[in-house]
Amino acid sequence: MFYYIIAAIIILIDQVTKWFIVKNMQLGENITVIENFLYITSHRNRGAAWGILQGQMWFFYIITTIVIVGIIYYIKKHTKENKVMGIALGLMLGGAIGNFIDRLFRKEVVDFINTYIFSYDFPIFNVADSALCVGVVLLFIHMLFFEGKQEKEQA
Ligand SMILES: CCC[C@@H]1OC(=O)[C@@H](C)C[C@H](C)CCCCC(=O)CCC[C@@H](CC)/C=C/C=C(\COC)CC[C@@H](O)[C@@H](O)C[C@H](O)CNC1=O
């Protein structure tokens, strides 16, 4: 249950930040937060990461539904003993639903976090993307660490 609360908090923060950007910024408007590193830019993306598959909304609905069902199944099945796994899945669930809401009601995703990592202009993203990425990374770290530990115990 606790992991769904993490997802709900992510969805809330994601939707509130997107609502704020849509309400208070013109499309393309740019606010400098940290010169040459972090900007808030009002941006829209009708695709997935790096703008791939522009406009393929049905594809995104299907994939996101599969992702959401898969995460809920995993939360039910595998998070009795794995708290870290549960937190990772909760973050991913919140992120997936956050972008799903945008795709359903706006037919595009609102992005606004514009960073330059080592002067590479990383694609503009949002809170939902961040939660998805942190969740994915956490899941990999946990699987690497936990699987390793399990094998050691069994060995
Ligand atoms: C984060 C997944 C993208 C997110 O997937 C989702 O919604 C999921 C739930 C549904 C998708 C239809 C299915 C996954 C597609 C896989 C994918 O795309 C490969 C991703 C790799 C990933 C490593 C884990 C890179 C990261 C990139 C970015 C995130 O940087 C923090 C740049 C984000 C910007 O391009 C921004 O414009 C994107 C826009 O917000 C819409 N977001 C999505 O489609």
Image: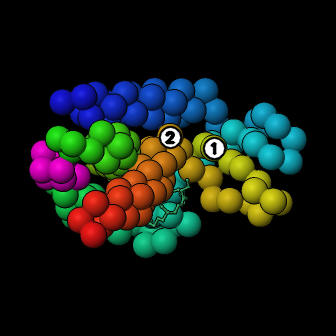
As drawn, is 53 to the left or to the right of 97?
A: right
Residue that mark 1 sits on: 113
Near-viewer residue (47 or 119)? 119
- For ligand 1, tell me if the residue under mark 1 lies within 8 Å: yes
- For ligand 1, tell me if the residue under mark 2 lies within 8 Å: no
Mark 1 crowdedness (10 Å alpha carbons): few <14, some 14-19, many ≥20: some
Question: Is there any visible trace of residue 29 in the rendered image?
Answer: no
As drawn, is 145 to the left or to the right of 77?
A: right
Is 72 included in the stretch rendered in magenta?
yes
In this rendering, the answer to whether 58 lies above or below 133 is below
Q: Position of residue 36 (x, y in %)?
A: 86, 48
As drawn, is 129 to the left or to the right of 12?
A: right
For the stretch drawn in magenta, the main secondary structure is: helix
Q: Secondary structure at mark 2?
A: helix
Extreme-right residue of the structure: 35
State which tag comes first along the sequence, 1 or 2.
1
Q: Which residue sits at x=27%, y=69%? A: 155
Task: Determine the image quadrant of residue 12.
Answer: top left
Locate the N terminus and report the quarter of the image it occupies. top left
Q: Amino acid at mark 1?
A: Ile
Q: Position of residue 97 (x, y in %)?
A: 30, 44
Q: Position of residue 65 (x, y in %)?
A: 20, 57
Q: Position of residue 43 (x, y in %)?
A: 60, 48
Q: Which residue sits at x=45%, y=44%? A: 131
Q: Are marks 1 and 2 in contact (CB under 8 Å)?
A: yes
Q: Which residue sits at x=48%, y=71%? A: 52
Q: Amino acid at mark 2?
A: Val
- What's the distance in space between the residues labelled 1 and 2, CA to CA? 8 Å
Q: Tell me the magenta residue range.
A: 71-78
Mark seen at residue 150: none
Residue that mark 2 sits on: 127
